[in-house]
Image (tube, helix red, strand yellow):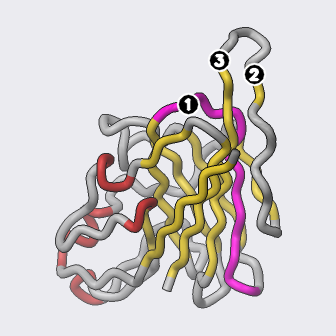
Amino acid sequence: MTSVITASGARWRMAGLSCLLALACWQPLAATAQSETTNEPGTAAEPTRDSGSEQTQFDIVVHLTKAEPATGTVEISLFNSSENFLVNPYLQTSGPINEDGSYTARFGKVPPGDYAVVVVHDENGNGKLDTGFLGFGGETYAFSNDARPLFGRPDFDEAKFRVDNNTRIHITLD
């Protein structure tokens, strides 16, 4: 069984520092652990068991669409607790946007639990989140569960989703 979760992002136009605070933790990808990217939408694999324990592990597939312009890179961060949300990702992956504005990533062998996803589209590939004048416009980002607070950043509870089987998340940046 695969859970499907959808969300959409926008070129958030929040004033001043609230936009910067929303993703203050975003930094270029330093390392990737047990994640992979593909150029085509993937299907989550069957649940696997960790050979060292009886705990079942699952795959989370994140499919991103409508990244415009279809240039630069995308970074997808997976968080597994409110304490680490927007501070210390559990897993991260990044790669170039496909010509059609899509990108698919697979986080493999994650234990059951609550997770949240943050997607940042680095349109010019400079390794940082660019904002427009006074925080208006700039580069696109989105949260799982379509979390969009009026001001500031969402908290973990707003963006979290439960993983107790293979899970597929669709995020549209528009």
Contact flag, marks 3 and 1 (Cβ < 8 Å): yes
Q: Earlier in the sequence, mark 3 or mark 2?
A: 2
Q: Residue at x 33, y 81 (%)?
A: 12
Mark 2: few/some/many CA within 10 Å (<14, 14-19, 20+): some
Up-down relation of residue 47 to residue 170 (above or below): above
**Element at badge 2?**
strand
Q: Earlier in the sequence, mark 2 or mark 1?
A: 2
Residue 12 versus residue 165: which sits nearer the camera? 165
**Element at badge 1?**
loop
Q: Residue at x 49, y 33 (%)?
A: 113
Check residue 103 for magenta coloring.
yes
Amino acid type at circle 3 is: Gln
Q: Quadrant of residue 96?
A: bottom right
Tell me the residue that label 2 is attached to: 49
Q: Residue at x 27, y 51 (%)?
A: 155
Residue 127 percent across, percent down from the top left: 54, 66
In three-dimensional space, the C-alpha distance between marks 2 and 1, rounded to whole angstroms, equals 11 Å
Magenta residues? 100-113
Prevailing secondary structure of the magenta residues: strand
Amino acid type at circle 1 is: Pro
Tell me the residue that label 1 is attached to: 112
Contact flag, marks 2 and 1 (Cβ < 8 Å): no
